[in-house]
């Protein structure tokens, strides 16, 4: 898929809302990545993004992603911050602002035979390199958690990084890799729990050790005291293009930030998108054992749970809470429907009211690994919704002002 395809924009405007503001220039494929990270700085002026000059294929080891910062108060001017050779279409390179900082951002890269992370200062232009790649940052800004991205790429192509083979690709459950904690200042890192340890933990009373195991989708609780990740496994290795389409088993795991007090938060096998609501609760799409599929609020280290938005939020999406709304407002999206339209919406929990922000067409060439989910995320003040979309024919970034809807 080349750039500059002739295309008629297709989107449906949300009631009473202006058209979304595009903040990228259509000259390249531009996007941010995942929905659970800070794209916008605390002041609301600068948005992070990445861009590359092709679409419609997997990255090659030599394809570099350009990392940039967009000045939302100066005609959306793009300023380059650096490059990355460790990226994918769904989560880019884990680009994000370091929590609590208005000057430092982080992303993953490849140096020689290692994946690393780079911390850049947008004021001084200085950079420093940490010896491990990051997945999620602690809200206190002190540490990150990570895992082996070459392992992810080996077992779920498109969610890891090409360029470095999995050194344990012949091992079903390596003891050398797993969940790693990284100090953001010193770069000191330690393995908190290995894939081998998790593989030895029975699943619903059954031995699952004779499978191919990996970790995915890591998060840190709001108080930086608990960690959350998905432990996944598949029974056999297949061709990458086949594995990208075939299923696997999932269980959601939590544990203390020192690796203790492990808890299987969702053993159902259906854990999907999730965020922490507060230090004790996880807001997730799943199908709990004996319950209906939907969004659920799970209490950590407990069997307590209750559904959220069961009348309206009836399909899987990328769910977050809108900041500064006392967790009353949820931001969410859908996957493309039969007409390939994606709905972007807000949901008000107290009144069970849905507010549709827009419907955005996803052209047919955007499928599989190089699909473009909206992955909606708010700025840190909860005033604007930023999202990636292909409704104008290429992958670009947009925002909508929601202050009049949520009162931020």
Image (tube, rainbow, N blue to C red):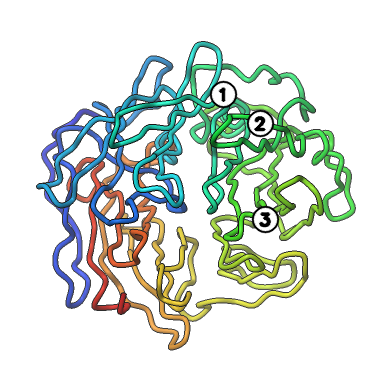
Task: Give me the residue at 31% from left, 32% from top.
Answer: 67
For label 2, the residue is 189
Location of residue 380 with respect to 132 vertically, above or below = below
- Toward the viewer: 239 or 251? 251
SS for dot 1? loop
Whether label 2 touches label 1, CB < 8 Å = yes
SS for dot 2? strand
Location of residue 106 with respect to 390 vertically, above or below = above
Label 3 Cα neighbours within 10 Å, binned few <14 / some 14-19 / many ≥20? some
For label 1, the residue is 131
Label ID, residue 225: 3
Question: What is the distance, in whole Å, between disc 2 and disc 3 at their CAs?
Answer: 17 Å
Q: Quadrant of the C terminus?
A: bottom left
| Upstream in sequence: badge 1 or badge 3 | 1
Residue 349 lies, in percent from the top left, at: 47, 81
Quadrant of the image occupied by residue 27: top left
| Upstream in sequence: badge 2 or badge 3 | 2
Question: What is the distance, in whole Å, between disc 1 and disc 3 at their CAs?
Answer: 23 Å
Task: Give me the residue at 27% from left, 56% from top.
Answer: 44
Residue 341 lies, in percent from the top left, at: 30, 58
Q: Quadrant of the N terminus?
A: top left
Label 2 Cα neighbours within 10 Å, binned few <14 / some 14-19 / many ≥20? some
Task: Give me the residue at 22% from left, 40% from top.
Answer: 394
Compared across the picture, whether 197 is left or right of 153 comes to right
Residue extending furthest front? 124
Task: Give me the residue at 41% from left, 56% from top.
Answer: 335
Residue 254 lies, in percent from the top left, at: 71, 54
- Toward the viewer: 72 or 163? 72
Compared across the picture, whether 215 is left or right of 244 comes to right
Residue extending furthest top? 112
């Amino acid at each position: 898929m080349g750039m500059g395809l002739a295309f008629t924009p297709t989107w449906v405007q949300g009631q009473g809302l202006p058209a979304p503001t595009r903040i990228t220039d259509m000259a390249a494929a531009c996007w941010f990545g995942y929905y659970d990270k800070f794209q916008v700085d605390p002041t609301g002026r600068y948005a992070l993004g990445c861009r590359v000059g092709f679409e419609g294929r997997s990255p090659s080891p030599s394809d570099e992603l350009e990392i940039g910062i967009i000045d939302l108060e100066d005609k959306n001017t793009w300023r380059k911050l650096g490059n990355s050779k460790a990226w994918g279409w769904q989560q880019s390179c884990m680009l994000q602002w370091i929590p609590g900082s208005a000057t430092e951002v982080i992303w993953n890269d490849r140096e020689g035979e290692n994946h690393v992370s780079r911390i850049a200062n947008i004021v001084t232009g200085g950079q420093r390199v940490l010896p491990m790649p990051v997945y999620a940052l602690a809200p206190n800004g002190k540490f990150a958690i990570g895992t082996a991205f070459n392992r992810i790429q080996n077992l779920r192509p498109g969610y890891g990084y090409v360029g470095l083979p999995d050194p344990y690709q012949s091992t079903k459950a390596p003891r050398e890799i797993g969940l790693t904690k990284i100090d953001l200042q010193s770069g000191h890192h330690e393995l908190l729990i290995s894939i081998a340890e998790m593989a030895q933990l029975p699943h619903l009373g059954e031995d699952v050790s004779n499978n191919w195991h990996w970790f995915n989708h890591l998060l840190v609780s709001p108080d930086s005291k608990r960690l959350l990740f998905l432990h996944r496994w598949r029974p056999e290795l297949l061709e990458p293009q086949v594995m990208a389409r075939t299923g696997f088993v999932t269980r959601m795991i939590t544990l203390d930030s020192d690796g203790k007090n492990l808890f299987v938060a969702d053993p159902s096998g259906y854990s999907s998108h999730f965020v922490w609501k507060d230090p004790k609760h996880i807001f997730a799409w799943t199908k709990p054992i004996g319950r209906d599929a939907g969004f659920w609020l799970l209490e950590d280290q407990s069997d307590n749970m209750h559904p959220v938005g069961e009348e309206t939020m009836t399909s899987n999406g990328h769910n977050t809470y809108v900041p500064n709304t006392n967790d009353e407002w949820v931001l969410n999206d859908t996957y493309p429907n039969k007409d390939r339209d994606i709905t972007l919406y807000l949901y008000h929990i107290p009144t069970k009211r849905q507010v549709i922000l827009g419907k955005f067409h996803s052209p047919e060439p955007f499928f599989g690994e190089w699909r473009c989910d909206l992955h909606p995320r708010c700025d840190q003040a909860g005033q604007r919704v930023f999202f990636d979309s292909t409704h104008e024919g290429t992958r670009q970034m947009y925002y909508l002002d929601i202050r009049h809807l949520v009162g931020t």
